[in-house]
Amino acid sequence: MRAFRGSPIDRRRHWRTSCQCHPPQRFFGARAFLIDGWRPEEIDGRPADVFDPRPAEAGAGVVLFLHDFDAQSLGENAVFTAELARRKLRVVCPIADRCWWTTAPCPDFDPTISPLQFVRDAVVPFVGRRWNIGPPRIALLGIGMGGQGVLQLTYRWPRDFPIVAAIAPAVDFHNWYGYGLSLDQMFASKEAARQQTATLHIHPMNWPKHQWLCCDPTDEYWFEGTERLGSKLASIGIPFERDLVSTAGGHSWSYFERMAAPSLEFVTKSLSAEPVL
């Protein structure tokens, strides 16, 4: 999605319009093209894309990727796939449409089970059955909506998910309440949505050991929230890494691809620092 200039209200209207113009087509059985090395799977009846390089890196963990509002999997992206293959990283990408990846049930996903409950109760066990790997060797990676989703996971359950890389995370998603998105059905008010943002779930004494954040400074949707999150982490004294300087087209796949190598390099190094159980 290209960067858009205008007032905050104009930006929100543009986000809503652009998302409605490009609905994700992610129903299981009607799959988008997957690059070689990926295969479609089903996790508790829901679609997912899985990357299983052969041979995988000995002792390596698994990357759990949460997608953005466009529901695009890494299995559709040649740049990320090349970086994953070079590092011999296994990956699972659950597909959940416009779910926002929170602990609140979302009508675009399921009326009773929240997206993050599904990740913990279904995706994590799938990884264990498939590769005999579980927390804490499941590294989290996400973009946009999924970027804030992986932050939700790591801040709520830092011992299970000590490794996180968030690209252009939609930290302040509550600002989009009231614009006809599924957030309006998930929360009773903008304040109720704000109370569930990742920033408010940082624990000063219990935090993930490996954090990496990035956002294009021309990303008019999510830069301010990402910058604010970094400032809070720094003020508390929680160690993390960030890149809020690199730019490549705002909130767009041009930028996401630009950050593929550094994000996955961080993930690889962090996995090597975690003990193999």
Image (cartoon, rainbow, N blue to C red):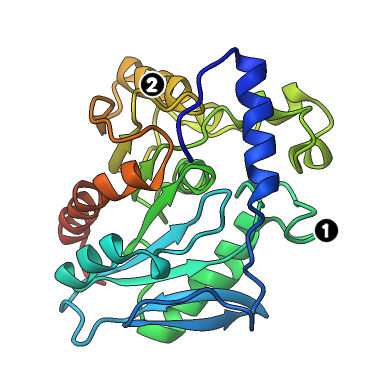
Residue type highlighted by circle 1: Pro
On the image, the x and y values in percent for residue 48 come to 53, 74
Q: Quadrant of the C terminus?
A: bottom left
On the image, the x and y values in percent for residue 74 come to 40, 64
Q: Relative to 257, does residue 216 appear above or below in the rendering?
A: above
The residue shown at (46%, 48%) is 150
CA distance for labels 1 and 2: 33 Å
Residue of label 2: 227
Q: Relative to 194, does residue 276 appear above or below in the rendering?
A: below
On the picture, is 41 further left or further right than 270? right
The residue shown at (29%, 35%) is 248
Q: Can residue 194 be spotted in the picture?
A: no
Give the camera-side residue of 201 and 110: 110
| Residue 55 image label | none
| Residue 111 image label | 1
* Secondary structure category for the residue under label 2: helix
Q: Residue 88's image quarter?
A: bottom left
Task: Categorize mark 1 by other alpha carbons within 10 Å: few (<14), some (14-19), many (20+).
Answer: few
* Secondary structure category for the residue under label 1: loop
Tally the marks. 2
Give the camera-side residue of 91 and 223: 223
On the image, the x and y values in percent for residue 205 come to 39, 31
Which numbered disc, 1 or 2, marks the residue that appears first in the sequence?
1
